[in-house]
Image: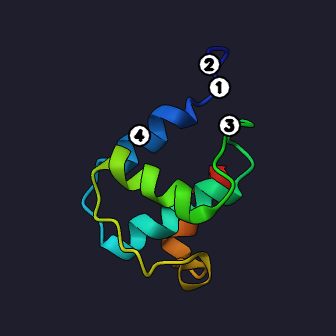
Amino acid sequence: MGNGNINYFNTLISELKNTRATKEFGQIALLIFKSGKMNNRKPKTFREWYRIFCNCVGCKYVKSYEANKLSNPTEELKNLFNYLQ
């Protein structure tokens, strides 16, 4: 980072440590998946990514959460993670 740039990875890690509702974690996973910030080793499907995300973050994996059920995050959540858009 340096040169006055913000380290968004550290910001993301810090935000993921906060207590959140299970659905919010799913919505964050979807924001990351759709962001274009992941490299070419990104899982092909959201379901695969969501499982990995939950395992890494330590949040509950909900099998029924599909991208279409998580696609409307609150304005607060979108603003908090605006660097992913």
Dot 2 crowding, Cα within 10 Å, few <14, some 14–19, many 20+? few
Frontmost of labels 2 and 3 is: 3
Q: Label 1 to label 4, Cα distance in Å?
A: 17 Å
Q: Dot 4, how many residues are within 10 Å of its Cα: few (below 14), some (14-19), or many (20+)?
A: few
Q: Are marks 4 and 2 in contact (CB under 8 Å)?
A: no
Out of 74 and 49, give the one closest to the viewer: 49
Q: Is residue 63 above or below residue 45?
A: below
Residue annotated with mark 4: 13
Frontmost of labels 3 and 4 is: 3
Q: Of tags 4 and 2, which is closer to the observer?
A: 4
Residue 41 tag number: 3
Answer above or below: position of 52 versus 41. below
Question: Left or right of 32: which side holds 27?
Answer: left
Say what amino acid the circle numbered 1 marks.
Asn
Which residue does the numbered mark 2 point to in the structure image?
1
Q: Position of residue 43 (x, y in %)?
A: 63, 49
Residue identifier under label 1? 5
Q: Earlier in the sequence, mark 1 or mark 4?
A: 1
Q: Label 2 sits on what residue type?
A: Met
- Choose mark 1 or mark 2, whichever is in front: 2
Residue 2, percent across and down? 62, 14
- The three-letter amino acid code for the residue at tag 3 is Arg
Q: Residue at x 66, y 44 (%)?
A: 42
- The quadrant holding residue 38 is top right
